[in-house]
Amino acid sequence: MNLVSIAYKSMKQRWLPSFLTCLSVALGVALMVAVLVLNNVVTTMFQQTGSGYDLVVGPQGSATQLILSTIYRIDSPIENLPWRYYQEWLEDPRVEHAIPFNLGDTTQVGDFPIVGTTPQYFLVEYADGKKFRVGTDEFGLRGTWDAVIGSEVARKNGWKKGSKFKMIHGGQDDHVHDEEFTVQGVLEPTGTPNDKTAFVHIDGFFQMSDHSQPIRDAIRFQANFFKESEEEVIERYKDSIDEILKNEADPHHHAHGPIPDIQKEVTSILLVLKGNNLQRSNRAFIIQGELREGRRSQAVNPVLVMARLVKDLVGNIRLAFLYLTGLIIVVSGIGIFVSIYNSMSDRKREIAVMRALGARRTTVFSLILLESALICLLGGLAGLLLGHAMVYFAAPIIEARSGLLIDPLAFTLVEFIVIPILVAMASLVGFLPGLTAYRSDVAEGLQS
């Protein structure tokens, strides 16, 4: 009979304490696995979302706030930029795509964020190698009052193609716009904030009440932004301004139709630059420097901002959970030590018989260490299975409640070091009981 069989029979003889000790190890490992997998999913989501864009251009202010409002839609926009500034980026030879973003409003039902943008937004990758899909190649933002909604918006509001909805004006819960948008497409799940967003055609967004800037404010705004005189701005948009003032003087005129460019604003601009990855990175760096010198706006790399935020915020939470689960595993190790050490007094005769039958001291010592290792290994393997089972069954619940897509079969490389760590811990906690068995007296053991 080999040592493994003997150690297994010894554990079986003391099945209750052995089972409880294995269970404590399994629960600690399961919690650690669940934390690692879920943290990896959340971190990946934060880092990948927005990685399809080289820069986000917005007004001067907090770079983090700009990314949280534009990419993640969980913060208020800073300010606005003139439409003319967006048009300049469209004509910049370094820019492949310049996509306008207008934020601030929410859906009347469900309070989901509204984004006013162009169809171009759905044609670029929202993350590396990932494009939007709606089941067909048509995204539906062709008409002024068309909308495309995320999968979570559709699920929670019960909307589908043809559904109509209204919007609440930004910051005013009691002000509901009269205009209605019609859903022309539902995005397939992406596991990003896009799932919880309603996208509307930017032309319709501009034509809604209070979404166009009053002409006199628009003139002053452009003059300050572009460092021009008001007279220069008026001359640039002379025909549009004359038409606007004429309509304002007509009491029977009701504003409807396209909004003049001078009255348009954008919250932010997504830039995809030309060239390979290295060229895009270099151009992004140069553009950021140019905007810092101009001090009119800022250009932010969304991946770098979120990586820093994940490191400072999510990383600390992850460490806290890992410390907690590590403490649980240490307590489990202490439980193994106490269980084996307390059993030594009951096993004196058993050890003495083994010694009398020819077993060497090192054999007895190895047997105790092996028993400790078996408890840790069985608990660790059970913990790995239990942890992934928790993730597997929790994935659809988390997706339903938060819209966060979790691969139920996901795993992390860190899991591969769990078993070696447990073996090392087993050797440590089994050393003292093994040493006690090593030093036991045969004659005294046979008399007990």
Image (spheres, rainbow, N blue to C red):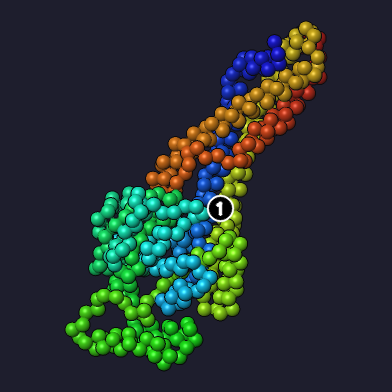
Residue 51 in picture, x, y percent from top left: 52, 58
In this rendered view, identify the residue nearer to me: 115 or 175: 115
Q: Is residue 171 visible?
A: yes
Judged left or right of residue 277, residue 423 is right
User: Which of the two residues, 19 or 180, is positioned nearer the viewer here?
Assistant: 180
Q: Which residue is mark 1?
A: 314
Q: Is residue 414 above or below residue 369?
A: below
Instruction: Determine the residue positioned at 56% across, 75% down.
Output: 291
Q: Position of residue 53 (x, y in %)?
A: 50, 62
Q: Residue at x 28, y 52 (%)?
A: 160
Amino acid type of the residue tagged 1 in the rendering: Val
Count of numbered circles in the view: 1
The residue drawn where x is 45% and y is 39% is 394
Quarter holding the N terminus is top right
Q: Residue at x 28, y 86 (%)?
A: 243
Q: Is residue 162 above or below residue 65?
A: above
Asked if 301 appears above or below 132 in the picture, the reply is below
Quadrant in which the C terminus is drawn: top right
Residue 47 placement, left or right of 90:
right
User: Which residue appears farthest toward the left when viewing the image?
Assistant: 252
In front of the other: 241 or 34: 241
> Of 150 and 3, which appears nearest the observer?
150
Q: Is residue 340 visible?
A: no
Indicate left or right for 52 with 378 as reference.
left
Task: Please tell me whether residue 340 is drawn above or below residue 44 in the rendered image.
Answer: above
Query: How dense is the environment of label 1, judged by Cα within 10 Å: few (below 14), some, or many (20 and up)?
Result: some
Element at label 1: helix
Residue 253 image-quadrant placement: bottom left
Return the x and y of residue 262 as percentages of the image width and height: 37, 81
Task: Tell whether 68 sits left or right of 207.
Answer: right
- Farthest bottom residue in view: 231
The picture places residue 188, in percent across and down from the top left corner, at 38, 50
